[in-house]
Image: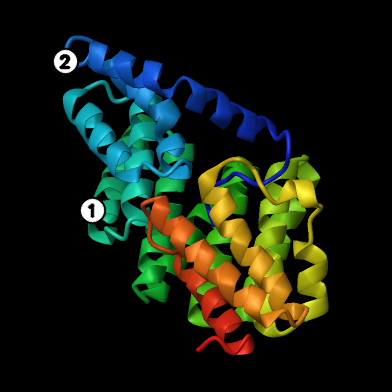
Amino acid sequence: MLEELDLIPNSPRRAMLSELESRIGEIEDAIDYCGGEYPELSVRFASQIWRNFLYFGRVERGVNLLKRVVSESDCLDEYYCEAMLGLGVLFLKIGMSEDAEEVLSKLVNISTEMGSTRHSSTGKIMISRVKADRGDFQASKELSDEVAELSAENGDFFTGALAMHAEAYRRRIAGDLDGAVDAYQRAIAVYKEKGSHEMELEERRNLGTVKFLIGKYDEAALILKRDDQEWESGIPYFDAYSKIDKAILACIEGRNEDAINLVELALSSIEDCEQRVDPDELLLIERIRVLAGGL
């Protein structure tokens, strides 16, 4: 998962999401109120809440709102770029890859003209993911390599680590699991050095799932195990994917029936979030079903 949040209890980002969610109705009312008269304010508000539509299972609603606010505004600033990024990500999460690529390409063009390196780089990373999902691994590689080179030049560790994540994702989809492990480990090292604990743990989770695919079950279990209170985040998106982690552990421990049931619960929960299952997660589900005898 590339959505930059994790399952840590009392995480500052998780707390921020929950706080926004408690006021989401007020914020949407403010967006409607600003409407055509103050479109730049609508974009500003929308840019701050698009992740809530993703993580709390209202993707269609988020797509409609973001499409409206970006079409109404001609104030091309950082908030506009963030709203465009959100729209592209939401399109991608519901499988509308052509729409996602179109929006993200516009984001790259606009942010490049503005001199917003962070948004142009993030847009390229997301397009890299679109390309990988289609099997165009060379185009995906070129985009992530471009971001990696630029981040090294300007010292932006965040986009550099995102480029490593994109590389790992591409290699994982392409079947180069050892290469994916290497890329995830490099991203983890960056986050650890910079003290970005949340992102480090999210990439560790990704590393653990690849270890499972490789067949290094003890290493995977060691990475993926969490205390009981850590399994439920209160955020539907993450709770859905945590069920896949639980299914992996059940599979490793020989609890095959539990593993299959958890997979079905995960699929149902992801559907409730109005999203497709990410291709890298589908690989995990397929492996669990094979090992647990669920085919």
Return the residue at label 2: 36
276 vs 246, left or right, is: left
Tag 1: residue type? Asp
Question: Image height check: is 270 above or below 294?
Answer: above
Disc 1 designates what residue? 99
Q: Residue at x 21, y 16 (%)?
A: 35
Identify the residue shown where x is 34% and y is 72%: 134
Q: x, y (%) of residue 270?
A: 45, 57
The reply to whether residue 181 is visible in this rendering is: no
- Three-letter amino acid code at disc 2? Gly
- As drawn, is 11 to the left or to the right of 75? right
With respect to residue 92, does 79 lie above or below? above
- Asked whether 204 or 146 is in front, the reply is 204
- Horizontally, residue 258 falls left or right of residue 94, namely right
Circle 1 SS class: helix
Image coords of residue 108 (percent x, y): 34, 44
Q: Label 2, secondary structure: give it.
A: loop
Label 1 neighbourhood size at 10 Å, few (<14), some (14-19), many (20+)?
some
Across and down, in percent, residue 125 comes to 45, 54
| Colouring chosen for the image of the structure | rainbow
Residue 69 visible in this rendered orientation of the protein: yes
Q: Quadrant of the N terminus?
A: bottom right
Q: Which mark is residue 124?
A: none
Specify the quadrant of the image occupied by residue 257. bottom right
Whole-Å distance between the Cαs marked 2 and 1? 24 Å
Check the image and report above or below for 174 versus 199. Answer: below
